[in-house]
Amino acid sequence: MKNKQKSFTLTEVLIYIAVLAIVVSIVFSFFLWVTRANTKTKAMREVLDNARRAMEIMTYEIKEAKSIYTPTSTFDSHPGQLSLETKKYLPEGETTSYIDFYLCGVQLCFKKESQNPITLTSDRVEVSNLMFSRIVTSGIPSIQISLEINYKNPTGRPEYQASITSTSTASLRSY
């Protein structure tokens, strides 16, 4: 009785290695694609969350304001500034107070009278356009806000490119 050993030929081994290389490269490509998509999603979410939060705060304060304080407001240009006269955030012994929205460098800031400014946007984004426009219809003053926010991308990598342009209008309720 002859003893036959079963083994792979060189051609079979090369075919197995080629198939394995193809499978590994497909899995790696998929993993790389998922990682980039996740990074892009995080960047876009950061931009959207900052824009939403900033717009909500500004429109709320406009609706609650007593009037628009025009001497310090800058309309229809970038960077704009909006100053509002309000009955909220009153300093001791005062009947009215003033709040401002403006750019501090590339951050959107909110300043209450006699207090330090508060940044409304995170340090991972930058405001590239902030413009306020006055709209007066039937005697009720309104403010249109145009805001453009970009994700900070010092590396220039495409998965970190995220931007949003948002526009909202709010009317003063107490007018």
Image (tube, rainbow, N blue to C red):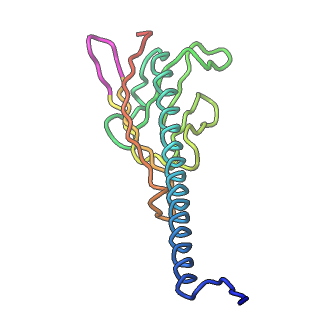
Residue at figure coordinates x 30%, y 23% from the top left:
135
User: Residue 120 sits in which quadrant?
Assistant: top right
Magenta region, residue range: 134-142
How many marks are shown on the rendered structure? 0
Which one is nearer the viewer's eye here, 3 or 102? 3
Q: Is residue 116 above or below residue 89?
A: below
As for residue 63 lying within the magenta part, the answer is no
Which one is nearer the viewer's eye here, 173 or 153? 153
Where is residue 86 drawn, in percent x and y?
Answer: 52, 18
Residue at figure coordinates x 61%, y 20% from the top left:
89
Magenta segment main secondary structure: strand
Which one is nearer the viewer's eye here, 42 or 28? 28
Image quarter hosting the C terminus: top left
Q: Is residue 154 above or below residue 104?
A: below
Where is residue 76 drawn, in percent x and y?
Answer: 31, 36
Where is residue 109 drawn, in percent x and y?
Answer: 54, 38
Q: Is residue 29 above or below residue 102?
A: below
Which one is nearer the viewer's eye here, 155 or 70? 155
Where is residue 71 drawn, in percent x and y?
Answer: 41, 29
As for residue 137 lying within the magenta part, the answer is yes
* Image side of residue 35 versus residue 143, left or right: right
Q: Is residue 56 above or below residue 175?
A: below
Residue extending furthest left? 138
* Image side of residue 155 versus residue 137, left or right: right
Residue at figure coordinates x 55%, y 33% from the top left:
110
User: Residue 68 sits in which quadrant?
Assistant: top left
